[in-house]
Amino acid sequence: MIILGHFVSNEFWPGVSNRISEIRNPATGAVTGKAALASIEDVDTIVKTAALAAPAWAATPPASRATIMFEFRDLLTKHTDELAELLSSEHGKSLPDAKAEIARGIEVVEFACGIPQLLKNEHSEIDAEEVASFSVRQPLGVVAGITPFNFPAMIPLWMYPVAIACGNTFVLKPSEKDPSVVMRIAELFAQAGLPPGVFNVVNGDKVAADALLNHPQVEAISFVGSTAIGQHIYARGSTNGKRVQALCGAKNHLVVMPDADLDRVTDALIGSAGERCMAMSVAVPVGEDTANRLIEALVPRVRAMKVAPFTDPSSELGPVISKQSYDRIHTYIEQGLDMGAELVVDGRDITLQGYEDGYFIGGCLFDHVTADMPIYKDEIFGPVLSVVRVASYEDAVGLINDHEFGNGTAIFTREGDAARDFWARARTGIVGVNVPIPVPVAYHSFGGWKRSLFGDHHIHGMEGVRFNTRLKTMTSRWSSGIRTGAKFNFTDGKDL
Ligand code: NAD
């Protein structure tokens, strides 16, 4: 079995560490690959390579960087099927989901193709007599990314196309659970003409992440993952003087108003199930009648969700990522039952022939969940939907705003006034109106509030450009000639 190493200077490199991790197919539980777990020395070698490549890349005109981005975009599009297959084989999600994830990642590359326009800056011609000012945004140097397992292609793509287009070099540490797709994409980026050392991948775990946080040549860290780890990344990174953005855990509420189109609501809730930071994992129907109608509409849909490995084209819900996640989700379900929530659809009892050792859990639906229950408070990160019944719209807004997390939320209503009030008052970074999973298009920025984000900047869009560049403002005085009467005559070689 090949051991996946690292990608540095546009080549695969095994590194010097002798630690390795096992990559499993979550549909079968079988080990399908192994990946190196970098040592501090490995990280040092890779960061130094990225640092060495940084000055020349920063001096490369943005239009030339964009030319490579265009080529990269075309290669990603051309190889989408192959990339999706690789992604699904380690993550377990269905092929349409994997392709959709790659398509969303490509959007960020398309955004980065516009970098010459995005880096145009501010200039004021006359601040005082003969005095002008302008501001530029310069690259930081080496930027690192640390990413989670759940979108192994898209989430890294939220980060490095913008960072690299801005003139930085990049070191990515993907999740050790499904790193192969990133390695193939790195090859494609090299094929697109990216100079060696500009985009590098280090495979590893906490040792590699901490080595990046401690490395003096890493200027900034983009992190996406759980809140506990994100808080550590933010604290350690900022103590070490780095710029950090850490996008973290979530518990997203979908408010169902009495006038909502329930077909749309059920589509939204079913379509956002599972291991997503933008999963709408809490439905909040307003009023008993709305709640009863919602449960009635949801039960058959949750029961009918096709649970199958990605190789089955009709799969709607693949396995969860690991045995550890599987056990954690089961524990939450038992806790919910113990505390009195009503499990109206129980997806635990599921066996798929030939996949008995896979980590499959069918859709689970809890009704009568209350705000003190761990199934409400914590991020379960599995196919478990909780319904919290509230008496009024104000109660729904209060519930959202009191929650520890503030990643995203959505309201379904036909009432414009309620929608406007909702997006104005919801204390979350992302808001949807009659839209589930409202992750914006790449030219807008994405990120949460409260304990869903540590740091100031959201990711991609203009916030991504700001995060990946540093502002410099220059003030200058040049004699205008009008005041001094100087003649600008260069022909006799004399001064002015
Ligand atoms: P995770 O926090 O376990 O891992 C994320 C990354 O951190 C991985 O690369 C991992 O190797 C590294 N890591 C793990 N332990 C570490 C440690 N002790 N020190 C340093 N680094 C460490 O997250 P996960 O399980 O891979 O992903 C799921 C989480 O990601 C969920 O909480 C989900 O909400 C969150 N997520 C958030 C967003 C968002 O945009 N806010 C998007 C996707 C996923």
Image (spheres, grey):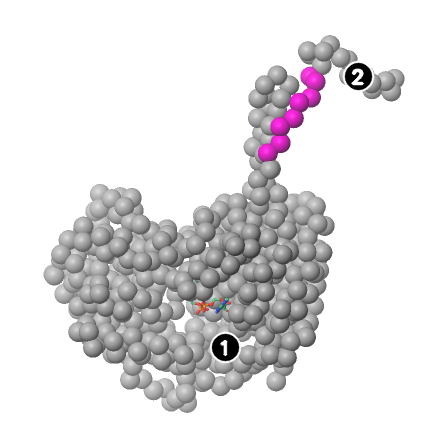
Q: Is residue 45 visible?
A: yes
Q: Nearer the viewer, mark 1 or mark 2?
A: 2
SS for dot 1: helix
Give amino acid for label 1.
Ser
Q: Determine the residue located farthest toward the front in the rendered image.
A: 239
Residue 6, given in percent of the width and then of the height, sits at 64, 70
Q: What residue does disc 2 label?
A: 496
Residue 479 magenta = yes
| Image marks 1 and 2: residues in contact by CB distance under 8 Å | no
Q: Main secondary structure of the magenta part?
A: strand
* Residue positioned 35% across, 77% down in the render: 328
Q: Nearer the viewer, residue 285 or 229?
A: 229
Is residue 370 left or right of 45 when viewed as pictured? left
Residue 252 magenta = no
Give amino acid for label 2.
Leu
Q: In the rendered image, which quarter contains the C terminus?
A: top right
Q: Which residues are magenta?
A: 473-480
**Residue 89 - label:** 1
* Residue positioned 59% across, 65% down in the render: 211
Is residue 384 left or right of 210 when viewed as pictured? left
Q: Is residue 194 visible?
A: no
Q: Characterize the local packing of mark 1: few (<14), some (14-19) or many (20 or more) Cα atoms within 10 angstroms.
A: many
* Residue positioned 50% across, 77% down in the render: 89
The span from disc 1 to disc 2 (Cα, nearest Å) is 71 Å
Q: In the rendered image, which quarter contains the N terminus?
A: bottom right
Q: Determine the residue located farthest toward the right in the rendered image.
A: 492
For residue 119, which quarter of the picture?
A: top right
Q: Nearer the viewer, residue 491 or 127?
A: 127
